[in-house]
Image (tube, rainbow, N blue to C red):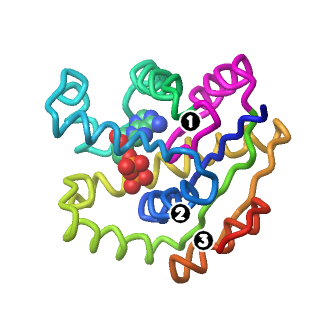
Amino acid sequence: MIRQTVLLFGPPGSGKGTQAKKLEKALRSPHVSTGDMFRDHQSRRTELGLKVEHILKTGQLVPDAVTNEMVRERLLRPDASLGVILDGFPRNVAQAKWLDTFLTTRGYGVLGVIVIEVPDPELASRIKSRAAKEGRSDDADEQAIARRLDTYRKQTEASVGYYKTANVPVHVVNGVGSVDEVERRIASALGLVVS
Ligand code: ADP
C-alpha cells in the first residue's frame, strides 16, 4: 500500500490551515497542525500546554525534542496510517531530518511539498483580522508576529531547500486569491482532481 504525506509550508497568515482542511477532504487523510495541537494542549491546560505557553505567546519555536515527540505520537495513531497533511511541521532542517527518518522507516512517501507564498503586507492584514476573530495572543502581538515571520524566512525556508535537494517535488503556489482559487492551484500542483 502506498502511504502518502503532503507537507504544507507558508509564512504565518498564508492560509496553510484553511488549505489543509480542503486537502483533508481531497486526500482523505487527516490534517495534522502542530500549532493547533499546541493550542489544544494549552486550552486543556495539560503539562505540555503550560510548558509551551510562553513560547507560543512570544512567537518562538517549541524545542525540537518536544515537538517531534508530539508529532510521533500523532502519526502513530491509526487514522494516520494512510498518510497525513502536515501543517506547520517541519519548521526547521532538524525537524525535516527527523521526519524523514520517521517516514522512511515506516514506508511512507512524501507526495509533495506545497509552499504557499503571500506578500508581507497582505500577511500582516490577514493576521490582524484573524486576531480579531480567533483571539490568538500571538496574532495580536507585533513582536511575536515579526519573530514568527523571521523564523519562517530563516529556518523554515531552509527546510524547503532540504526537500529540493532530497528530490521531493516542491510546488510553490501563489496564495493570493480566493480560498477556492488557491485550492485549485494546490490540487493541480499535486495532480489531484477537485470537484
Ligand atoms: P503560524 O503558522 O500562523 O505562525 P501555527 O499555528 O502553525 O502558526 O503555530 C503557532 C506556534 O506554535 C508557533 O509560533 C510555535 O510557537 C509553535 N509551533 C508550531 N509548529 C511548530 C514546530 N514545528 N516546531 C516548533 N514550534 C512550533
Question: For the residue carrying disc 3, how many other residues have a C-alpha within 10 Å: few (<14), some (14-19), or many (20+)?
Answer: many
Can residue 150 be seen from the camera position used here?
Answer: yes
* Ligand 1 in which quarter: top left
In the image, residue 92 above or below residue 187:
above
Q: Find out whether the residues at labels 3 and 2 contact each other: C-beta distance under 8 Å.
A: yes
Q: Earlier in the sequence, mark 2 or mark 1?
A: 2
**Residue 30 image position (x, y, % from top left):** 51, 44
Q: Residue at x 34, y 38 (%)?
A: 37
Task: Give the amino acid at mark 2.
Answer: Lys
Q: Find out whether the residues at labels 3 and 1 contact each other: C-beta distance under 8 Å.
A: no
Q: Quadrant of the N terminus?
A: top right
Q: Quadrant of residue 58?
A: top left
Q: Which mark is residue 92?
A: 1
The magenta segment is 81-108
Q: Quadrant of the C terminus?
A: bottom right
Q: With 66 as the anchor, is 101 left or right in this view?
A: right
**Residue 79 image position (x, y, % from top left):** 52, 34
Q: Earlier in the sequence, mark 3 or mark 1?
A: 1
Q: Which residue is mark 3?
A: 183
How far apart are labels 3 and 1 at the CA level? Answer: 25 Å
Q: Earlier in the sequence, mark 3 or mark 2?
A: 2
**Residue 39 image position (x, y, % from top left):** 26, 42
Q: Which residue is mark 2?
A: 22
Task: Give the amino acid at mark 3.
Answer: Glu
